[in-house]
Image (cartoon, helix red, strand yellow):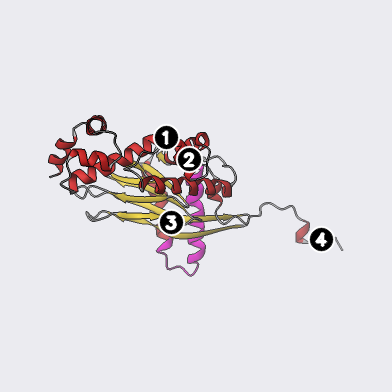
């Protein structure tokens, strides 16, 4: 009788320990009143936000991003974000929030260094792949779970193959730094009317000023003092549009040394002086 090997003697072709957790996967907006109030993404999730039609904006960790058709925004666990658009021209977006479990890691995507925004070369291609998952989610097949998992893994492989995000450093260390930057933003927001120096700002969150400046720019896209200047100008816009305070009072409330300096900075940033901006808002 011929000897037959047991199946465990055969060469292993492939083995994987994979899983997926999905919070949402759908097309959104298309209505004038659409907006996403300030929120923070769960620490173990990653979100992909793709603009299909018209334009919208996002604010992620204090930085504003103007988004148009074909733009893909990546939001990572712990990021603070909000969204809005022009009610006169409602946008359409394809949004996903998920965790990809691999080799015991709750979300292997968090170990990758994604850029904040990508421009998709073929938007129609992205929409086609996205719709395959939506079709699986709507399936009434007795094997619906298999269809959904297969479609999700195929979509994720498609996205990762196009983006090719490199591996990042130690996840826990990076998350600790992100929390420091979010803490720094909160600290500065509460003191916009005060004089804020870089050393004092860094010291408030327990970081060296040079390292603080480097990681702040990495996480927000802006150097600390440039970010602070934008926050002060945003506050100035709110006060100009929503209060009767004069320019001197607003300059003081926003931490500018004098109303003349405030007016110069405001004009350089928005292309018009504060008084003209107030008239256009009215």
Between disc 1 and disc 4, the foreground one is 1
By secondary structure, the bulk of the magenta-drawn segment is best described as: helix
Residue bearing the label numbered 2: 202
* Residue 62 x %, y %: 37, 44
User: 215 and 239: which one is in front?
Assistant: 239
Q: Residues within 10 Å of mark 3 (few under 14, many from 20)?
A: many
Closest to the camera, between mark 2 and mark 3, is 2
Q: Could you tell me how far apart the alpha carbons at marks 4 and 3 are, in whole angstroms?
A: 43 Å
Label 3: element kind: helix
Q: Residue at x 34, y 46 (%)?
A: 58
Among numbered discs 2 and 3, the one appearing first in the sequence: 3
The magenta stretch is: 137-162
Number of residues whose C-alpha sits closer than 10 Å to that of mark 4, classed few (under 14), some (14–19) or many (20 or more): few
Question: Do the numbered discs 1 and 4 sit on residues whose CB atoms are within 8 Å?
Answer: no
Give the mark, 3 or 1, whose residue is nearer the N terminus: 3
Q: Which mark is residue 223?
A: 1
**CA separation in Å, label 1 and label 4:** 68 Å
């Amino acid at each position: 009788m011929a000897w037959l090997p047991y199946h465990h003697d055969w060469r292993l072709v492939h083995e994987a320990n994979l899983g997926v957790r999905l919070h949402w996967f759908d097309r959104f907006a298309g209505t004038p009143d659409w907006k996403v109030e300030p929120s923070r993404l769960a620490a173990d999730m990653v979100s992909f936000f793709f603009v299909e039609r018209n334009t919208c904006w996002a604010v992620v960790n204090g930085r504003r991003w103007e988004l148009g058709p074909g733009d893909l925004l990546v939001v990572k666990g712990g990021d603070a974000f909000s969204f809005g658009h022009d009610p006169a021209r409602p946008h359409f977006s394809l949004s996903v929030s998920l965790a990809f479990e691999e080799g015991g890691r709750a979300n292997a995507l968090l170990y990758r260094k994604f850029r904040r925004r990508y421009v998709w070369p073929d938007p129609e291609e992205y929409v086609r792949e996205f719709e395959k998952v939506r079709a699986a989610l709507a399936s009434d097949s007795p094997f619906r779970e298999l269809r959904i998992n297969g479609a999700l893994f195929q979509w994720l492989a498609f996205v990762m193959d196009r983006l090719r995000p490199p591996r990042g450093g130690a996840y826990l260390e990076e998350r600790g730094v992100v929390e420091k930057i979010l803490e720094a933003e909160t600290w500065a927001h509460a003191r916009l009317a005060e004089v804020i120096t870089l050393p004092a700002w860094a010291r408030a969150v327990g970081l060296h000023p040079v390292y603080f400046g480097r990681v702040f720019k990495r996480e927000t896209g802006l150097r600390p003092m440039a970010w602070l200047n934008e926050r002060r100008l945003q506050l100035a816009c709110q006060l100009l549009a929503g209060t009767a305070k004069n320019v001197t009072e607003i300059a003081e409330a926003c931490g500018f040394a004098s109303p003349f300096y405030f007016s110069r900075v405001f004009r350089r940033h928005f292309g018009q002086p504060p008084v003209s901006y107030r008239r256009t808002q009215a």
